[in-house]
């Protein structure tokens, strides 16, 4: 492979895109500058008339304004190349999850972090871990440590790393490729640099204003490209530029949604499959170019999938791509999917919210968490790069248990480890609700 260079962090001084020079502008330490109250200055107000309303469900990543000639990441700005014909459909990949090769306690990864003076800190009981330390560099992980990271991500849903400004897109892709073949997105923008067609550009500038009339917050929770036959396991997202405040991301655990339900409802969901469609996302590209990168597909996946490494069951539906349950009357399908959508959006105890800094990396396991963007920092500039390795075709409970293994419930597992006996039965008495403090 040819040696590829990327703009260095040292070049990020005074980064800006377009004419807006205040809110959301990258400063010398790699952080976006904010005026503190989230309001644009006079210059921004003067430019507001240029902004286009952007529906997050109908957006592929575009530069909406003029690019500042000094912007340090110009070669990584979003690009939507014209195509004369679509690529062929994706093949089926033979994938063995790297988490199978992990130390059960992630000991090698822990040693790597400790040897560099770093720390591993839990952010929630069910979801979220942050690995911190100025000398902890993701690009220095060896294969054994990467395998341990795969297990930690599978266990905690999402793992964060601060301060990865030194990471190059090459080492980000290498890390992703260790986990599985890199996905090429059917619709989203790729970097302008021509050799990065397995990288997705996450981008918004002061000319792309979120259309707050186009979505509800609950609808934004999704798992990446689940219409694919082998949707991604890990997503590795690194932000180059982000505002000081706002545009956080949330992750909500599918393990916890499953654990929160009655045994009867769990069994019902385990019996179901859902239709995941790529047609709506493909339509979003048609506004940019008429020929898609790949023809859209629809795929049926189990509603409850089992993670092949942890053996835990997770609810695997999302309002972004799932249109209906298969073999279920429409009213029942609509209500069940709406209920599950609300479960993901409302479980405050099993959701983690991350406040980004430039150079942060989040690695999450799409098999076991749904995630959601927030859009509160307009007109700030936000620019990131995403790498998404494929994982196995989703495994149903029935498939997982076919050879004698038993799929597990996350909360039951936790209680057993702690020696806690959960209540076996509802006492049938009136429950008073609500805090009264
Ligand atoms: Fe996403």
Image: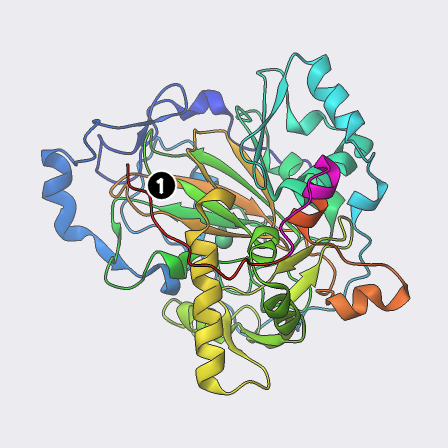
- Quadrant of the drawing holding the C terminus: top left
Tell me which colouring the rendered structure shows.
rainbow
Q: Residue furthest right?
A: 403
Residue 419 shown in magenta? yes
Relative vertical location of residue 294 with respect to residue 420 in this rendering, above or below? below
**Foreground pick, 125 / 132:** 125
Residue 271 in picture, x, y percent from top left: 67, 75
Residue 243 in picture, x, y percent from top left: 33, 33
- Quadrant of the drawing holding the N terminus: top right
Q: Sort mark 1 into few (<14), some (14-19) or many (20+) by Cα contacts within 10 Å.
A: many
Residue 192 visible to an observer of this rendering: no
Relative vertical location of residue 109 with respect to residue 232 in this rendering, above or below? above
Look at the image and give the residue range highlighted in magenta.
414-424
> Which quadrant of the structure image shows residue 265?
bottom right
Residue drawn at the location 43% of the way across and 69% of the way down: 338
Q: Is residue 259 left or right of 241 when viewed as pictured?
A: right
Residue 69 visible to an observer of this rendering: yes
Residue drawn at the location 48% of the way across and 71% of the way down: 337
Which residue is the site of mark 1?
A: 247
Residue 18 in picture, x, y percent from top left: 26, 40
Q: Tally the marks.
A: 1
**Foreground pick, 3 / 205:** 205
Residue 71 in picture, x, y percent from top left: 37, 33
What is the secondary structure assignment of the residue under circle 1?
loop
Residue drawn at the location 77% of the way across and 58% of the way down: 407
**Foreground pick, 427 / 282:** 427
Q: Is mark 1 within 8 Å of ligand 1?
A: no
Relative vertical location of residue 115 with respect to residue 275 in this rendering, above or below? above
**Foreground pick, 182 / 118:** 118
Residue 260 shown in magenta? no
């Amino acid at each position: 492979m040819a040696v590829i260079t990327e703009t260095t962090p040292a070049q990020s001084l005074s980064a800006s895109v377009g004419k807006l020079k205040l809110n959301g502008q990258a400063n010398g330490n790699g952080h976006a500058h904010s005026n503190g109250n989230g309001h644009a200055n006079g210059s921004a107000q003067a430019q507001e008339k240029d902004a286009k309303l952007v529906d997050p469900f109908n957006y592929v990543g575009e530069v909406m304004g003029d690019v500042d000639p000094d912007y340090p990441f110009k070669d990584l700005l979003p690009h939507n190349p014209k195509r004369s014909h679509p690529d062929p459909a994706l093949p089926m990949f033979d994938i063995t999850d790297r988490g199978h090769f992990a130390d059960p306690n992630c000991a090698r990864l822990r040693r790597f972090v400790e040897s560099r003076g770093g720390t591993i800190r839990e952010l929630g009981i069910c979801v979220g871990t942050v690995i911190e330390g100025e000398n902890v560099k993701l690009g220095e992980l060896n294969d054994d440590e990467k395998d341990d990271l795969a297990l930690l991500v599978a266990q905690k849903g999402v793992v964060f790393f601060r301060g990865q400004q030194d990471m190059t897109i090459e080492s980000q892709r290498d890390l992703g490729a260790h986990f599985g073949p890199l996905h090429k997105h059917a619709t989203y923008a790729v970097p302008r640099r021509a050799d990065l067609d397995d990288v997705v550009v996450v981008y918004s500038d002061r000319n792309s204003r979120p259309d707050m009339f186009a979505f509800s917050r609950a609808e934004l929770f999704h798992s990446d490209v689940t219409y694919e036959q082998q949707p991604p396991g890990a997503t590795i997202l690194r932000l180059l530029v982000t505002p000081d405040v706002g545009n956080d991301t949330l992750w909500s655990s599918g393990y916890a949604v499953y654990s929160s339900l009655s045994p009867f409802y769990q069994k019902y969901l385990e019996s179901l499959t859902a239709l995941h469609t790529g047609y709506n996302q493909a339509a979003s590209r048609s506004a940019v170019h008429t020929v898609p990168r790949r023809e859209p597909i629809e795929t049926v996946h189990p509603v409850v999938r089992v993670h092949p490494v942890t053996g835990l069951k997770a609810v695997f539906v999302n309002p972004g791509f799932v249109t209906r349950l298969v073999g279920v009357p429409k009213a029942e399908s609509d209500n069940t999917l709406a209920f599950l959508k609300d479960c993901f959006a409302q479980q405050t105890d099993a959701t983690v919210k991350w406040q980004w800094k430039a150079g942060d990396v989040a690695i999450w396991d799409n098999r076991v968490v749904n995630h959601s963007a927030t859009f509160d920092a307009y007109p700030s500039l936000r620019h990131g790069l995403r790498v998404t390795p494929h994982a196995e075709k989703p495994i149903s409970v029935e498939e997982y248990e076919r050879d004698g293994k038993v799929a597990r419930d996350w909360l039951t597992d936790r209680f057993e480890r702690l020696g806690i006996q959960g209540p076996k039965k509802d006492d049938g008495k009136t429950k008073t609700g609500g805090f009264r403090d």
